[in-house]
Amino acid sequence: MEIRAWTVRNAPGLFCQGCPRFVPQATSQSLVILDEIGRGTATFDGLSIAWAAVEYLHEVSRSRALFATHYHELTALEGRLDAVANVTVDVKEWRDEIVFLHKVKPGAADRSYGIQVAKLAGLPPRVVARAGEVLRLLEKSDASRGGADALDDLPLFAAARPTNPVTDVRSPSAVEAALETINLDEITPRAALEELYRLKGMLPKS
């Protein structure tokens, strides 16, 4: 058994480097492992390349293959190509977070978790929150309008957020200032109740 290895470099302008070598040479005896083919170019271009690569490996090379992709549309190939089966990494959501269970199960992911992963990776909370706003608008946009047109309805970041997007520095409210003066380790239950009434009285009247 001959073993060959190719490296596919996923970067702008290099998103297909390696594919011209291994795709034509793959046979029914090959095990092909592909990760994110089509990344680094426009969405439709990348999806088209990934789709065609799967079809070629299935119909022409007839290779065994593991094909990891972020293009959810590719999961439709399970119903079109006899030997294609979808699997996904099991994920649970808990308190607006995601937990990877380190298990692979049959089927496709129910949705994308890109924003949650970006949060786990350490993207600033303000950027994560803004990304969620954009995503919700795009998902709600009418299909006939398209995502790009839907962005016309989205207020600018500065308009949708406080005026200081970097630090959000502001003076503490009267209630917050009062809370800072309370010693929770020494206050008695009766005094705590009295403080609650006092703090409630400091709230703005609706």
Image (tube, rainbow, N blue to C red):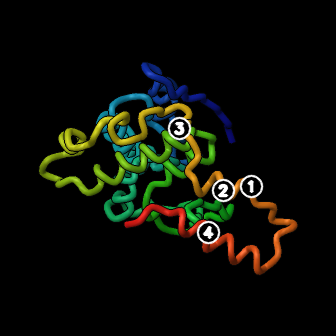
Residue furthest toward the left?
A: 144
Separation of residues labelled 4 and 2 (CA atoms):
10 Å
Q: Which of disc 4 and disc 3 is earlier in sequence?
A: 3
The local secondary structure at tag 1 comes to: loop
The image quarter in which residue 99 lies: bottom right
Residue furthest toward the right?
A: 186
Question: As rendered, which of 89 and 126 lies closer to the eye?
Answer: 126
What residue is pinned by disc 4?
A: 198
Identity of the residue drawn at 55% across and 29% down: 8
Q: Amino acid at mark 1?
A: Thr
Q: Amino acid at mark 2?
A: Ala
The local secondary structure at tag 2 comes to: helix
The local secondary structure at tag 4 comes to: helix
Identity of the residue drawn at 46% across and 37% down: 37
| Circles 4, 2 touching at the beta carbon (< 8 Å) | yes
Classify mark 1: residues with Cα within 10 Å, few (<14), some (14-19) or many (20+): few
Of tags 1 and 3, which is closer to the observer?
A: 1
Identity of the residue drawn at 53% across and 31% down: 166
Q: Position of residue 72 (x, y in %)?
A: 39, 53
Q: Amino acid at mark 4?
A: Arg
| Circles 2, 1 touching at the beta carbon (< 8 Å) | yes
Image quadrant containing the N terminus: top right
Question: As rendered, which of 69 and 29 lies closer to the eye?
Answer: 69
What residue is pinned by disc 2?
A: 178
Q: Position of residue 57 (x, y in %)?
A: 43, 45
What residue is pinned by disc 3?
A: 168
Look at the picture and state if 107 lies above or below 10: below
Separation of residues labelled 2 and 1 (CA atoms):
5 Å
The local secondary structure at tag 3 comes to: loop
What residue is pinned by disc 1?
A: 181
The image quarter in which residue 196 lies: bottom right
Q: Which of disc 3 and disc 1 is earlier in sequence?
A: 3
